[in-house]
Amino acid sequence: MASAKSYPTLEERVQEVLESYEIKELPDGIFTMKAPSAQEAYTVNTRTGQCTCPAGQKGKPCKHMAAAKELLKQKEEKHEMEPREAMRILGWVVKQDPERLLDLSSKQEAKVFKALATILLRCYEHVTKQELEKLLE
Ligand SMILES: [Zn+2]
């Protein structure tokens, strides 16, 4: 019985790009992607929706664009979820009876410290070096 040849889905091709291509992120939503066997990289511009690969030059959707969008999505999710989770945990801590907080298991304590560290780090990102030095005086 001959098995039918199945073509990889877009998802599988995107996965292949993410795993094996040499990818560089440039400013303004631009990526360069070079296949392991290729001499030159394709340039993907997620803002204009253009890719320099043969399919992209004909205005067709390509795996490079899909991979670039996936990378942007992953970055956004990572950026947004951590502070939200941190705020949730801190919100819980604020509502607790101080006596009860003494009974926290170490796993919960670790979560609380992680939440505090995340919030502090976010604040720190918006504080200039001079402001910080003043605070530490
Ligand atoms: Zn492309």
Image (cartoon, rainbow, N blue to C red):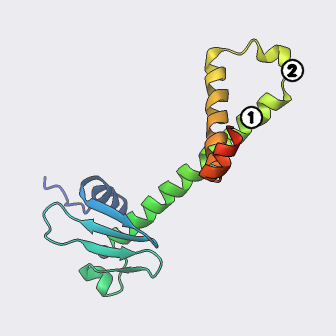
Q: Nearer the viewer, residue 110 or 18?
A: 110
- The percent coordinates of residue 50 (x first, y second) are 38, 81
Give me the residue at 13% from left, 52% from top: 1
User: In the orientation shown, which residue stands out farthest toward the top?
Assistant: 103
Residue 136, by quadrant, is: top right
Element on which disc 1 rests:
helix
Residue at numbered disc 1 = 90
Look at the picture and state if 106 lies above or below 16. Answer: above
Residue 66 left/right relative to 6 = right
The amino acid beneath tag 2 is Asp
Q: Nearer the viewer, residue 127 or 10?
A: 127
Residue 115 left/right relative to 91 = left
- The percent coordinates of residue 13 (x first, y second) are 30, 61
Please tell me which of labels 2 and 1 falls first in the chain: 1
- The percent coordinates of residue 35 (x first, y second) are 20, 64
Give me the residue at 13% from left, 56% from top: 2
One can see residue 5 in this view: yes
Look at the picture and state if 72 lies above or below 125. Answer: below
Give me the residue at 26% from left, 74% from top: 42
Give me the residue at 70% from left, 41% from top: 135
The crowding category of the residue bearing disc 1, from other C-alpha atoms within 10 Å (few below 14, some 14 to 19, many at least 20), is some
Q: Tell me, yes or no, whether the two marked residues, 2 and 1, touch with CB atoms within 8 Å.
A: no
Residue at numbered disc 2 = 97
